[in-house]
Image: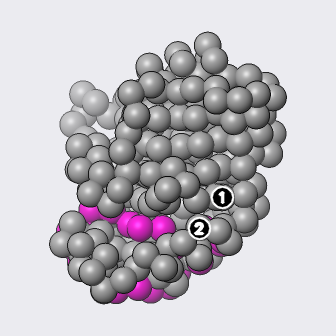
Amino acid sequence: MRSRVLVLPALVALVLLSLGGVARAAPCEQRSPTVFALNGETNLAMAACVTAKLRPTTTELVVDSPGGPSGVAMDIADRLARLGDLTIRVDGQCASSCANYFLPLGRRLLVGRQAIIMVHGGMDPAQVSKVAPSERASIQALADKQRAFALRHRIPPGWLLYRTAAAPTRVDGLDGAYRWRSTPDAELYLVEAPMLRSCLPGLDVTAYEAWLNSQLTPERVARLKQNRIVATGTIVCNGQKW
């Protein structure tokens, strides 16, 4: 798989809002004893809201999030993981840290009024090697935290687009081809069913697959390309372990 760059949260929000995802004001809401919603960035406000409001009776998680700080997102995900098997309903967008760390907790993926899932990778040695020496220790700590999180929740390196410092332009954990040709400056990857099924085999993605296939019209594809977004097509996790 070709290289990718880390995208600014503002760009994620702009692109996904144009595709129909609209973040709500409250970072979380216990809508019923079994349904809990996460809205907006995966930041400290969301973490505090989850700590205050999440009920242990929750079985369905509704998400609409462009992602956010990875360390906080992993902390939120660890708390959600205590609930056991979850149905996850994407109602708008699930990108960046939302896709990286929340989706692997699910056992069934449902579609709300929209269901756009985007990834651009997480913390890895290639990313650590690029930062200034003064920031390297903190970024390395995040990379170590992500690796421990992935091992704990059985997330393969391919799902996180994991690269080594020795091969910073290649994700060895993925095989296959994009639905349309990639470009070197691709910012985001629209996740399709083959990647979801191979990387997160415990997640039933039938509903999402049917919805997404109905949405990839020529007009939608043109908009995605214009925003430097590549659909993952036949890209799959190839079984590589940590």
Across and down, in percent, residue 200 comes to: 67, 62
Q: Position of residue 206 (x, y in %)?
A: 68, 72
Compared to 215, does 113 lie above or below?
above
Q: Residue at x 30, y 86 (%)?
A: 218
The quadrant where residue 203 appears: bottom right
Cβ–Cβ below 8 Å for labels 1 and 2?
A: yes
Could you classify mark 1 by the number of other residues whose Cα lies within 10 Å: few (under 14), some (14-19), or many (20 or more)? many
Along the line of sight, which residue is nearer the eye, 194 or 157?
194
**So how many labels did they put on this image?**
2
Q: Nearer the viewer, residue 242 or 176?
A: 176
The image quarter containing residue 56 is: top right
Residue 56: mark in rendering: none
Residue 228: where, in percent of width, then height?
23, 69
Q: Name the residue under label 2.
A: 208
Magenta highlight range? 175-198
Q: Which residue is drawn at 71% across and 42% down?
A: 60
Residue 219 in the image: x percent, y percent? Answer: 27, 81
Where is mark 1, residue-wise? 109
Image quarter hosting the N terminus: bottom left
Q: What residue type is labelled 2?
A: Tyr
- Identity of the amino acid at label 1? Leu
Q: Is residue 11 visible?
A: yes
Residue at figure coordinates x 69%, y 47% from the top left = 105
| Label 1 to label 2: alpha-carbon separation | 7 Å
The reply to whether residue 140 is in sight is no
The residue most toward the top is 52
Identify whether 136 is placed above or below 202: above
